[in-house]
Image: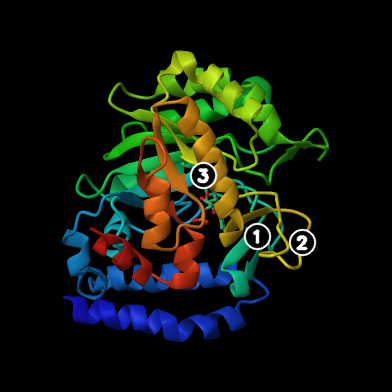
Amino acid sequence: MDKWRNRFDKFYDWIKPIVFSITKKNPEQAHWAFTNFCQTLNYLELDKKVLDNESNQKTPPWKISNAAGFNKNAEFSSRIIEYLGFDRMVVGTATADEWKGNVKPRIIRFPESDSMVNWMGLPGIGAERVARRLQNQGNEGIPITINLMSTPEKSGKDMLRDLEKTVLSSRYVPRVDRFELNISCPNIWGNNNKMDVRTKYRGQLKNMLDIVKKGMTDSQDLYIKVSPDLCERDVDEILRACEAYDVRGFTTTNTTTNHNPRYIPKSPDKGGASGNAVYKDSIRVQELFADRTDAKLIACGGINSITRARERCSIGNTSEIQLYTPIIFSGPKLLRNLREAI
Ligand SMILES: Cc1cc2nc3c(=O)[nH]c(=O)nc-3n(C[C@H](O)[C@H](O)[C@H](O)COP(=O)(O)O)c2cc1C
């Protein structure tokens, strides 16, 4: 079984510089190339043979899922996600309406520091279509998290109705056992582009939690995905808002607007940085939550080695990790390595 996966991982390492060079101006194309390749394997029923491997039978001390954005519209089937080496599939950010997001290009890679900056702006095909895709993937397989937020540019009651629609359209999809409310996207601006909506979302958190909670089934859990740019007061504010809503945990963290020149030598002056560029801020915020709550924490941001996974899982009540940028730079073999940890 591992013979094919070894070849696949080596092929990724071999083709990566070529793909990076071809897609330098629009890195999104590399994502679509990888998606299409995996979908073709799936269509030809070669995905099990090529991707599945012995390390998927191992149970490392952490559960691994893809971070949001990697499988926005459920373009990867959960079979592929599982064979790649994930224990859980995160879909989204899903918004109720279809949304085009910002003008392309909207991602920059920084291969010299294994970091990226993106200002995607939550593009997506709309929650109902995502739900139908997931429905077609059947009852069998790994659990699914729906990461959700309202369609950008909606506010007040419209925003709440939007969130409600997304929850209602996906709550009975088989294997959806968790919702992850994304209040931390740094790429959405309100009030005529003057206000970072992360501040606005924090102010309306109670209303959002109320509507999402009411839509979920009793067996589903609610998590919140937070920003690495929070200070102590912000964390206290979030935890206070969560008190009445049985929030099961926090995903720490999304991308950062702190573009440290050590990792991001030429900042585009917009967007959120990920990979190595967010690692320190992610840990800082994870620790702020760990100091204040016993809720579950999911570590996310720059986890590119067993050492980093260990470090993050030693903080508070953390036994899950999410990955996006490190997979792009290290390749899917990172998943095999992380599963080999004892
Ligand atoms: C291209 C790209 C798109 C992303 N889209 C989303 C998104 O739609 N929703 C979300 O909650 N996070 C999104 N993220 C943030 C990631 O889920 C993750 O929180 C962040 O990148 C830090 O983890 P990493 O260093 O493993 O990438 C995106 C990240 C990248 C690089």
Q: Residue at x 27, y 39 (%)?
A: 174
Secondary structure category for the residue under label 1: strand
Amino acid type indicated by mark 3: Thr
Q: Say if residue 74 shows up in the picture.
A: no
Q: Where's residue 173, x and y in %? A: 31, 37
First of labels 3, 1 by sequence position? 3
User: Are the residues at dot 1 and dot 2 in contact (C-beta closer than 8 Å)?
Assistant: yes
Within 8 Å: ligand 1 and the Cβ of disc 3? yes
First of labels 2, 3 by sequence position? 3
Q: Which residue is mark 2?
A: 268
In this rendering, the answer to whether 23 lies above or below 200 is below
Amino acid type indicated by mark 2: Pro
In this rendering, the answer to whether 228 lies above or below 222 is below
First of labels 1, 2 by sequence position? 1
Q: Residue at x 46, y 33 (%)?
A: 290
Which quadrant of the figure has residue 247? top left
Front label number (2 vs 3): 2
